[in-house]
Image: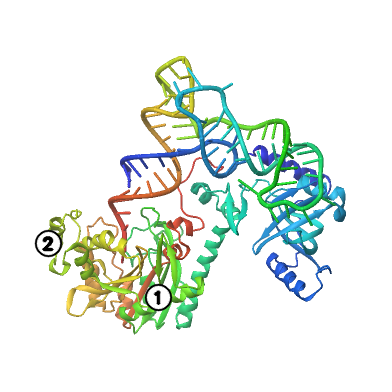
RNA sequence: GGGCGCGUAGCUCAAUGGCAGAGCAGUAGCCUUUUAAGCUAUUGGUUAAGGGUUCGAGCCCCUUCGCGCUCACCA
């Protein structure tokens, strides 16, 4: 490694410690409380005892976040995963030699432990009056300096690491320095837990299905491909879980879900990462109406559990996640937004003409469903700030969804939009194996041979369906998007710990 | 992939084409209740990389790399 000047100084401190027979990376720690627990234990102690009596001695550990050295007295803050506490090192307690040792060799970012009684400093802050301290892990590279200033109870952050590239490439430093980033990812985990809790309590079973798949499907997306050397087999990283989860419905699991990673070999943007986390669930004896109301309940539950409120702030909007959501038939929505009645345009040509006539710049040579989809993305999605279900979608972009009775061009499908983003997608599942085979073939005709998004024919899936699949509703939702909503982040990279970035030549980065 | 913008010290940021700077961090001191502690002194630069114009380039031009925004793409 190349060390810069600051790092060389710290390496010299490591050498000095070793020369004095002090191990800068010892194996054991003697911690007995988390910082948060120690503080609340001290507050209880204060209530029940004469404050002039010393508290019992505690040993706490954490990372040094600030140092204020005043000659014969030094203050410091250490931080662990639970919180921060001030250390006070007095020459009276530890002696001149130890105080100098601390001030000379202990830097911001080092992990240390400190023992002593808890007390309040003159300003009333709960503080350990340190008797003993020990280096737990010396930091060679200084953390990007960040200082907090408290004005009127508000924490103001100075000189924090805030260049997005550095933050994403060195997420460890970002997390170490920016507490609110850690909070974002705690929230993300809480969201997943809440979803599991909700689905478990509705008798769903969580399962795991293959990520490496010989045939990809269940979504319109280009896959990543790979190869199994020993089996000489081409494999794809899954683009959805759908086809495997529905095989489980055939197998007799009535309610299944999976939360896991999907991989799509497509553009990267503020709402697209090549790998992203998806929830899919399938529910036998349900249809898209039931799934719609289950979706409302589930997301309201997640808000309650994670935020304690159903009012969320996102991108300058206040969003109300209460039940019920607005429901808008897709045909009506497009009619209202653009003046085009898609039911009057039964093929791609007539829809293309209608869009032309309305000055909507349609793309050429698109199937009807794709044109409709572009209308949704351009004219409906951005306007759906408050939770909205759009329902009854065109058949040709929904090859796995069941027909709407009475309208052969429409399937029972809905998408949920919140904050101007597509959040989830669900439908009444097609369970007629012959119809399904026809749909796959239809896709093959409608979509260009070269279009990698068209579904390959999955014979085994048809075989499964031919054993009989119960009438079911299915649902898919991007967890990253939900995390964006609930943490008020406009970029997906802010809710993925290690988002995909282009490679740099500079290996140090 | 296209358009626009950005890249300067470990971090946050300055610098009309004219000596590359500040705060924090660091280093050496002073300081026994501080909390962006304070005070004194001080180290630290391939200005993303490469080329060009110019007496002179962080600044202007070209190329490359990366990031951001945006369009395209994306059920």
Residue A334 in view (yes/no): yes
Q: Are marks 2 and 1 on the same chain?
A: yes
Q: Quickly name the residue at label 1.
A: A322
Q: Is residue A349 above or below residue B50?
A: below
Q: Are marks 2 and 1 in contact (CB under 8 Å)?
A: no
Q: Where is residue A386 drawn, in percent x and y?
A: 35, 68
Chain where mark 1 sits = A
Image-based side of A378 in relation to A261, left or right = left
Q: Earlier in the sequence, mark 2 or mark 1?
A: 1
Whether residue A444 sits left or right of residue B23 in the image: it is left
Relative to residue A23, is residue B43 drawn left or right? left
The quarter of the image holding the C terminus of chain A is top right
Residue A242, located in which quarter of the rendered image?
Answer: bottom left
**Which of the pair A52/A250 is nearer the observer?**
A52
Few, some or many residues within 10 Å of mark 1 (<14, 14–19, 20+): some
Kindly identify which numbered label has been placed on residue A350.
Answer: 2
Q: Nearer the viewer, mark 2 or mark 1?
A: 1
> Front-most of A431 and A339?
A339
**Which of these two is toward me, A105 or A433?**
A105
Give the x, y percent position of residue A260: 46, 67
Q: Secondary structure at mark 2?
A: helix
Spatial CA distance of label 2 from label 1 is: 39 Å
């Amino acid at each position: 490694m190349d060390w810069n000047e600051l790092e060389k100084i710290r390496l010299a401190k490591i050498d000095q410690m070793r020369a004095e027979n002090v191990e800068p990376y010892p194996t054991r720690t003697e911690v007995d409380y988390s910082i948060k627990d120690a503080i609340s234990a001290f507050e209880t102690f204060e209530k029940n005892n004469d404050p002039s009596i010393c508290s019992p001695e505690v040993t706490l550990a954490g990372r040094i976040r600030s140092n204020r050295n005043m000659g014969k007295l030094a203050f410091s803050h250490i931080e662990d995963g639970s919180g921060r506490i001030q250390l006070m090192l007095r020459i009276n307690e530890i002696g001149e030699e130890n105080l100098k040792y601390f001030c000379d060799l202990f830097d911001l970012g080092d992990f240390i432990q400190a023992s002593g009684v808890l007390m309040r400093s003159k300003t009333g802050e709960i503080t350990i009056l340190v008797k003993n301290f020990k280096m737990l892990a010396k930091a060679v590279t200084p953390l990007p300096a960040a200082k907090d200033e408290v004005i009127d109870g508000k924490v103001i952050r100075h000189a924090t690491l805030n260049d997005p590239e550095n933050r994403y490439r060195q997420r460890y430093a970002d997390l170490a320095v920016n507490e609110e980033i850690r909070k974002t990812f705690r929230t993300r985990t809480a969201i997943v837990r809440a979803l599991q809790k909700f689905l478990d309590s509705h008798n769903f079973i969580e399962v795991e299905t293959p990520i490496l798949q010989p045939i990809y499907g269940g979504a319109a997306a280009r896959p990543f491909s790979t190869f199994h050397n020993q089996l000489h087999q081409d494999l794809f990283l899954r683009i959805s879980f759908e086809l495997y989860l529905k095989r489980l419905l055939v197998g007799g699991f009535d309610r299944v879900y999976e939360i896991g990673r999907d991989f799509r070999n497509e553009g990267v943007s503020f709402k697209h990462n090549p790998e992203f986390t998806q929830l899919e669930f399938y529910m036998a004896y349900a249809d898209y109406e039931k799934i719609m109301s289950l979706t409302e309940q589930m997301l309201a539950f997640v808000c309650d559990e994670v935020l304690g409120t159903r009012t969320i702030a996102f991108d300058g909007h206040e969003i109300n996640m209460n039940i019920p959501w607005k429901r808008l038939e897709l045909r009506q929505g497009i009619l209202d937004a653009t003046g085009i009645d898609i039911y009057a345009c039964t093929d791609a040509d007539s829809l293309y003409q209608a869009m032309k006539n309305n000055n909507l710049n349609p793309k050429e040579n698109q199937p009807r469903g794709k044109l409709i989809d572009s209308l949704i993305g351009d004219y409906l999605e951005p306007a759906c700030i408050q939770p909205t279900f759009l329902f009854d979608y065109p058949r040709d972009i929904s090859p796995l969804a069941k027909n709407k009775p009475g309208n052969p061009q429409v399937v029972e499908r809905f998408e949920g939009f919140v904050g101007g983003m597509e959040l989830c997608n669900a439908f009444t599942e097609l369970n007629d194996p012959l119809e399904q085979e026809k749909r796959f073939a239809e896709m093959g005709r409608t979509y260009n041979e070269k279009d990698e998004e068209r579904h390959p024919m999955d014979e085994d899936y048809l075989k499964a369906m031919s054993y009989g699949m119960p009438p079911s509703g299915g649902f898919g939702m991007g967890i990253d998007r939900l995390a964006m909503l609930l943490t008020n982040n406009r970029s997906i990279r802010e809710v993925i710990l290690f988002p995909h970035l282009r490679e740099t030549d500079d290996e140090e980065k």
